[in-house]
Amino acid sequence: MGLETRQHNPMVIIAGIGADLSSVMRIAWEVTLASKNAMFIASRAGEKARGFQPITGFIDEIASSTTNGVTKISKQALAVSCMAVEESIARDAAQRFRLAAKLAGDAPYLASLSTSNRQLEQTLIELQRKFAASNKDLSDELESLDDGMRAASAIAAVCRIEASQAAEYRTNLTVVADNLDTATGQIKDKITISRKRLKDMMQIENLQTGRLG
Amino acid sequence: MQVTEMCDGPHRWLAFGRDPGKPDGIMDSNQYMVIIGDRALLMDPGGIETFAPMLGAILHHVRVDQITDVFASHQDPDVISSLGLWDQALPYAKLHAPWIWESSIRHFGMKNIEYKPIADEGGACNLGGSAELEFIPAHYLHSSGNFNVYDPRCKILMSGDIGGALEKGQTSMFVEDFDSHVSHMKMFHQRWMPSNRAKLDWIARVRKLDIEYLAPQHGRIFKGPDVQRFLDWFEALPVGSAVA
């Protein structure tokens, strides 16, 4: 299989998305740690970080929803990866059955293959339909996660503002804001890459199976 | 795919091999089918790459639903890696194969075909003919769980890897000059067959059978006096060459 074929292979792409998202999980865990840190510092700062305290709850929510979202998407990516494998196997089988029929030529018993052929073609169509639907669901989940990161970026900006008014706790709270912003950016990048790869794959799949994009 | 008829009448044996479209780099293999009445047993059906030419060839002789039984002598990919495809062509068939390889063979894909494990002592398959097909133990030659198929009516022993030879090109299906054929078999048997004890056990067992054709999974088929010549030659050959 050439490099280009490997790059466009649905099994490889979906597995790659799953692998990318597992690194997002690690980043989401760092956001969780940042939120705990922020709560601790804000608690110690008391009145001096009064404006920061409510934000720690939002940071915690972001961490939680990101972790949950990534867990859900990882499971979906795994299921879709298995489906990609099944579809690839079924497509290969259909090609081999067609080749057998061609090699059979004018064989007197060629018609006896028609039932198996029909079932195989139907299975393939059904698998392709499920694969397309699952890819759409995966794409929607990635979009939802992306929306969450936009909200997280906004919260990081607010964190920075509140941190600047926290007197001697300003430095520590700014670090929290920076960490949140960095983590959010990293997660967004991974999501953007995954969404593009999924979109490209779906377009190629649609072309190959004769469906409209 | 070249098709050679080895026996006619109530039991009709066909040997399939020498596929001109075989991809380079994969071992050439012989596949066999015996047709008894309205049923057929497909033996060592071959690897994934062999599936399409095999199926195309078979349809000249039987309907696909006539193949009620499949046999795998052992678990090697050149024997049975096409199983996932046959599973879709023959959803109601039974696969007769060594009991020890069931969990391995299932890795090739088996949603429909029923696995019929063969016990170490052997077994039989009755397709409704006048004589049962016997599964003869051939363990450790080379696989730890391994069987041959013997048809007493046609006096054919499908011997799997035993008797196999590695030759290039489109060779004859039958051994024509035993002495010159030895050079194509020697390294294969010395390196692939691990146990002299297993070899002698098999030879003692098989000498009790009346065999007109010894039909291996690779190379040429032994006919008539060449069957005994092969047994004598194999009996004297030290095997298990990879260890001192």
Image (cartoon, rainbow, N blue to C red):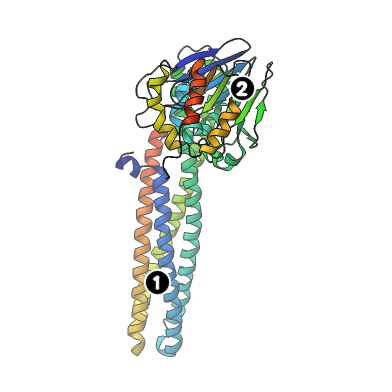
* Residue drawn at the location 47% of the way across and 20% of the way down: B221
Task: Indicate the amino acid at tag 1.
Answer: Ile
Residue A175 vertical position relative to residue B45 in the rendered view, above or below: below
Q: Callout 2: few (<14), some (14-19), or many (20+) C-alpha neighbours within 10 Å?
A: some
Residue A137 vertical position relative to residue B233 in the rendered view, above or below: below
Image side of residue A9 versus residue B126, left or right: left
Instruction: State the residue position of label 2.
Output: B209
Image coordinates of residue B61 in percent, x first then y, are 54, 14
Which sits in the foreground, A151 or A77? A77
Q: Chain of mark 2?
A: B
Instruction: State the residue position of label 1.
Output: A155
Instruction: Provide the secondary structure element on which disc 2 rests.
Output: loop
Instruction: Provide the secondary structure element on which disc 1 rests.
Output: helix
Image coordinates of residue A168 in percent, x first then y, are 34, 90
Residue B28 vertical position relative to residue A14 in the rendered view, above or below: above
Q: Which label lies toward us, 2 or 1?
A: 2
Task: Indicate the amino acid at tag 2.
Answer: Leu
